[in-house]
Structures are given as C-alpha cells and as structure tokens.
Amino acid sequence: MVKLGVNLDHVATIRQQRYTPYPDMLTAIKISEESGADSITMHLREDRRHIQFEDIKIARKNINTKLNLEMAPTNEMCRIANQVKPDFICLVPEKRQELTTEGGLDIKKNFNSLKSVVSKLQESKALISLFIEPDLSSIKLAKDLKVDAIELHTGKYAEAGVSNKEVYLNQIKTASEYANKLSLVVNAGHGLDYTNVKEIARINYMEELNIGHSIIAESIFLGLAEAIKKMKNLIESS
Ligand code: PXP
C-alpha cells in the first residue's frame, strides 16, 4: 500500500501570518497520525516563513509514526538535522523568493557539495532522500551519492494541462521503474491534490506520497481529520 506523508508546513503558515499561538502544531500532528498519516513532513526553511525550530522539536518528541525533515543542503541545516535526528531527511533546493519549492535538485551541478552534505548527515542516522525531477540521469547521480531514496517532483505533472499530462505521468512511471532497478526507495510529491493523486498512487514501486497544501486547504471545509482520511481513501482505492 502506498503511504501518505502529511506535510504540515501550512498549519505553521497560518500561525506565522499573525504570530498567534494557534493553530497548535501538536494538535495537528496528533490528528494527522490518528487520521492515517504514515509520516509527518516539515520543511524548516532558511527564512523560517512557516515551520520554526520549535515545531521540529515538538514533532520529534511527540511523533509516533515517522518524522520527515525537508531541508536545504546547508551547513546550518546539517547541524540541526544531526541534533534532531529525524527518521527521514529529504534534501530540497531552496530559493528565498520562491512561493514553494520550484523544482528538483540539480545534482549534476552540485554533486560535490551534495556528497559532502550526505556524508555530514550520516551522524543523524536518518534515511536520506533527494528531491529530484523524474529524469534518469538525476536518478543515476542520486545512486552515485549513495542515498537511500528519491522523491520524484510531481509539480510539472500536477500543473500540466490535459494535452501533456500523460507525458509527465509517463516520465514519473519510467523514473520509478529505473530507481527501483537501482534499489532506491521511490517517493513522490508536490502539487498533488484530490483530483490528480490516484494516477501517481498507481505507479509501480511508489512507496510514499508527500502531500501538504491541498490537504490543509481541504481541511478548511472538512476539518483536518476528514481531509486526511479523504486523501488516504483515494490513495488506498487507486
Ligand atoms: N515534497 C517536497 C519535497 C516539497 O518541497 C513539498 C512542498 O513543501 C511537498 C512535497 C508538498 O507539496 P504540496 O504542499 O504541494 O503538497
């Protein structure tokens, strides 16, 4: 069964917009786990626009499933990750101006610095994943970096119109097959919602989907528990 990682960044976004104590992160974590989340994802960004270090500490102390820390490959974040010891680390590119993560890591360009980051993160004992575009050369380079997993960027698929959706879907399918052949765990995420998740959940070798924005948006109408259960049902019935 494909797992669901619930990304709680936007619970923190709402809180940070007014620096209120609510919505309470611990409550969000508890509801997520009770509603079927297989892991909790948090992205501690350099600019701290949503998740704060305190959220990560609360998460580490209270999570009963798995904590997936999304982070930029920087020295500051390596220090934090080695201190927090999340279960999973997903390395993502980060730009200050972007609204959200805009694409996968450029492994070719950053191979040596990523190699050094991956080696620094061994101390965390976390399973390390790289957020990459669904292309075979990036997967091969991820394997060369000796990481455990990849997270395939589904943003282009999610944003594509009907005429080219199939093209992006096929790229993700081919990428998943290839990564599996190289013994990499395959996750995927970004831009997945209630209308487009099933096709991704059906892909062979898919281990876990990381979904945030659409679930938090739906929780305005349904509440967080029902929004997560609805997503989980779609994944399980795909
Ligand atoms: N996976 C990665 C690597 C991400 O950076 C994000 C966004 O923080 C997600 C998954 C979740 O994306 P979305 O909020 O669009 O569901």
Image: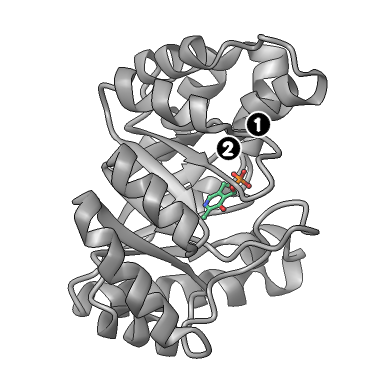
Amino acid tagged 1: His
- Residue occupying the point 36% across, 36% down: 236
State the mark number for residue 212.
Answer: 2
In the drawing, does residue 46 fall left or right of residue 141?
right
State the mark number for residue 10.
Answer: 1
Q: Quadrant of the C terminus?
A: top left
- Residue occupying the point 45% across, 62% down: 75
Numbered disc in front, either 2 or 1: 1
Q: Quadrant of the N terminus?
A: top left
Could you tell me residue 87's position as x and y percent?
26, 42
Amino acid tagged 2: Gly
Q: Is mark 1 within 8 Å of ligand 1?
A: yes
Between marks 2 and 1, how big is the CA–CA gap?
7 Å
Residue 141 shows in the view = yes
- Residue occupying the point 25% across, 21% down: 64
| Contact, mark 2 vs mark 1 (Cβ under 8 Å) | yes
Q: Nearer the viewer, residue 176 or 72?
A: 72
State the mark number for residue 62.
Answer: none
